[in-house]
Structure formats: structure tokens, C-alpha cells
Image: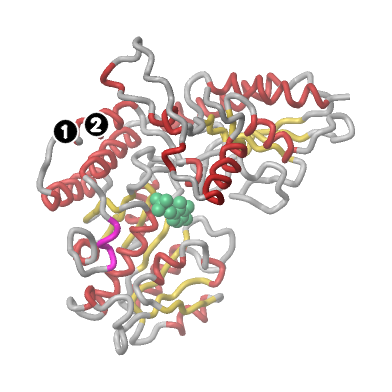
Amino acid sequence: MNRFASRRDFFAWTRGLVAAGVASRAVPAKAAPAPTQPADEGEDYYDKLGVTKIINAAGTYTILTASTMPPSVQAAVARAAKHPVRLMELQKKAGEYLASRLHCEAAVVTAGAASALTLGTAACMTVANNVSTPQKMPADIAGLKNEVIVQKAHRYGYDHALLNCGIRFVEVETLADYEAAFTDRTVMAHFFNAAEGGQISREDWIRVAHKHGVPCFNDAAADVPPISNLWNYTQMGFDLVTFSGGKGIRGPQNAGLLLGRKDLIAAAAMNNNPYDDVVGRGMKVAKEQIVGMVAAVDWFAGQDEEAMQHEFRRRAELIAERMKDIPSLESSIAVPPVANQVPHLLLRYDQQRVKISPVDVKHQLRDGTPSIELNPATGSNRASAGLPIDGNTIVVGVWMLEPGEDRIVADRLHDVLAKAAV
Ligand SMILES: *Cc1c(COP(=O)(O)O)cnc(C)c1O
């Protein structure tokens, strides 16, 4: 391993360096790779840089690098890296392939779902105004239509991706509010698929917007599985839908899908890299990520839904079984209703019998070797991702575990809890 006992030590150490103004070349060199390592695997730059590799028992969280690409996707990415191509031809043909595979009119690979939100909003601005709009967003839009209608409960951490286009949100709560909110400045109606509040259904959202000739966007970034969601929402009538490429689909983390109406996808492309003077210029998707995204859709769409869910449940049960002798511990398995719709393991116990809090368990696993990240809802009493939790719950996200890691997580959790049992 490296000289840093834990990630926290490492961060403390790097902060110290920054404070001391030490140049980054002070990062310790690591010995050359062992001669047994196959040459084509390349050097392990995590080791070289002193970066801690983790076991992801949390889920597809952005700050934990979300997911890993399956071998077939990794291979497609490596292969794409070997050849230059014409970027616009690749983008166009990848889009056509994805549209046909995902049963929608058109598609474009974006630099993640957040980027798709920006490009989709830019597309709606462009279509609602005129084709000269791309150069004007976000600053020079006086006199342009720029209102996006959204349910108050659907305002969220990705608002900024839309605001990047210079739009203004118009909030509604009731269906009557919604009906009354359309003006000649409305460009789009936005829906957050996994929102836990909001009175207006998807069907009503689409129906009313279409009555006014306004396109609807559904942000379903984290909402596969089920695999069929990749076409459910476009077929339901949403004009634009996005999914993150690096979450459940397990493509490159900096890729995403924008799916929908042909004219809107074409307008999104006008606002995207490689055009220079547009909001999307900084959202470049390289050839490796475009190919990786397509390969990941091939991989994901080819999965057996039931087998996949069964495997996640098996992992959760294996870990639960290992905890059997921990006094007072009760386990259950919960599947959130929309986003991250996969089995999560919940562990609860009497802290008089096992004298450690779930948050301290989380920290001990993080600081151990190997370093394990439990689901961030562990020890939290804020409702999270539709999981029935309270401040006394350990949450294990099993779906991003690599083969064999379920046992490692089970053993480490058992060690920590058994040691605290009285
Ligand atoms: C993760 C997420 C995004 C952003 O996805 P990226 O692919 O990381 O850009 C946007 N919206 C929602 C609801 C998400 O969960």
C-alpha cells in the first residue's frame, strides 16, 4: 500500500502541502510496477499518485467516481483511443445508433446528464426563438423567450445546468397554476423524474405542455434500472430525456445521453462542441467517451433484468447473513421507488448492545484497509433516495461492488460491529 494510512490523512497531508506552498512534484514516487504485471495493462497511476483505491459499498455517487465500466466497455474505449476519426461523423452515427437502439427519434452523447440538461435547455431556447440564439446565450438574451416552467418541488441541485442558458424558472404547485403559467415567453417545461414531491403527474405535465406547443424535458439521470426506462419516458411523450452515462449504465463517468425529438436534438448539437461560440463548447465528449457510451448502452441493454436484481439481492443477503451473531442487529433489504431502484441492505441495532454509532462504523470502514465507502445515508436521519432510514441505520449499497467484494465488506462490517458488542 502507500504511505498514507487513510484518505483523511492523505487530504490532511495535501492540504499541508498547499499551505506550505510545496510543489506538487513532492508527491512520493512509487516503485516501478512489478515485473509480473502484463505490459499492456499500463502503469497503475493510482499507486503512482498515492491515490487510495476504494471498495464502493455506497452506490453510483459522483464523488466516488460513480461506477466502473464493464470489461467490454473498457475494451471498446481502449480500442477507440487508437484511431483518429472525424468527430462530427462519430457523434452523428453514435446518435443514430442510440436512437434506433433506444426507440426514440434522435439521440446525442453528452458530457454527462448535467451537460445534457444544458444542451437540451439550449435546444429549447434555440427552437423557441430562432437559430441565431446559440451565440447569444446566456448573457445577451434581452427580448428572447427564456421561461422554463417547473414544479416548486422539482427545483434541485441541477438547476444551474439550466440557468447556464440564461433561462428564468417559473414555479408552479397545482395543476391550475401550471395551466396558467404558460406565456409567449415559455420555452420549456422541466420535470425531475425522481423528485419526492410535486402534485402534477408525468402524464399531466406532458399533456398540458403539448396543448401549449411547449417541449417537456425529463431528467431521469439516475433512473435505470429498470432497463426499459431508457425508452419509457420518450415513449410516454417527453420531448427530451437525459440519463447519466456513468451511473447505472456503467459507461464513462463523463458521458451521458440526451434522447428525444429530432429537431430538438439537432438544435442541441448546434449548441454543442465542436462549435466554438456556444454554451456547450466546454462540454466536449472525446471519441473514447462517445464509443464508451455506446458500448455501455449495448452492455446494459443486453443485461437480464431479473438476473441483475437477483445478484444484487444475493450480495445483500450474504452480508446480512454474516451479521447474524451481532446482538440485537436486524437487517432488511429496501429498493428505492425511482432512482437507484436496486436492493440496498439496511442494518439496525441497539446502541446499548453494540456501542458504536453507524456514522463511526462508516468512518472505521473508510479508514481501514482496504478502504470501504458505505452509502452516505448511513447514520443520517434525513430521508435519502427513498430509503426508509433513520439515524440508527447502516446502509450498504451493493450494486457497485466488484466480484468478491461482498465478502470483504461483510468481514469488515462484522469485525467493527463485533468489537463494539457488549
Ligand atoms: C447524477 C445526476 C445528474 C448529473 O449527471 P452527470 O452524468 O454526473 O452529469 C443530473 N440529474 C440527476 C437527477 C442526477 O441524479
Q: Quadrant of residue 288?
A: top left
| Residue type (three-letter) at the residue carrying disc 2 | Ala
* Residue in the image at 89% along x and 34% along y: 352
Outermost residue to the top: 36
- Residue 378, image x, y percentages: 68, 41
The residue to which callout 1 is attached is 82
| Residue at 32 percent of width and 52 percent of height | 111
- Say which quarter of the image contains residue 419: top right
Q: On the picture, is 98 further left or further right than 145?
A: left
- Label 2 close to label 1 by CB (< 8 Å): yes
Q: Quadrant of residue 322?
A: top right
- Identify the residue shown where x is 34% and y is 25%: 43
Quarter the C terminus occupies: top right
Q: Is residue 280 magenta?
A: yes
Q: Residues within 10 Å of mark 1 (few under 14, many from 20)?
A: few
Which stretch appears magenta?
279-283
User: Which residue is painted at 45% across and 48% down in the image?
Assistant: 223
Horizontal arrangement in the rendering, residue 126 relative to residue 368 (left or right) = left
Q: Residue 311: which numbered mark, if any?
A: none
Amino acid type at mark 1: Lys
Q: How is the image coloured?
A: secondary structure
In the figure, 92 relative to 409: above or below?
A: below
In this rendering, would 160 be left or right of 275?
A: right
CA separation, marks 2 and 1?
Answer: 7 Å
- Residue 220 can be seen in this image: no
Q: Is residue 353 left or right of residue 314?
A: right
Asked if residue 384 is positioned above or below residue 72 in the image, the reply reads below
Q: Which residue is mark 2?
A: 78
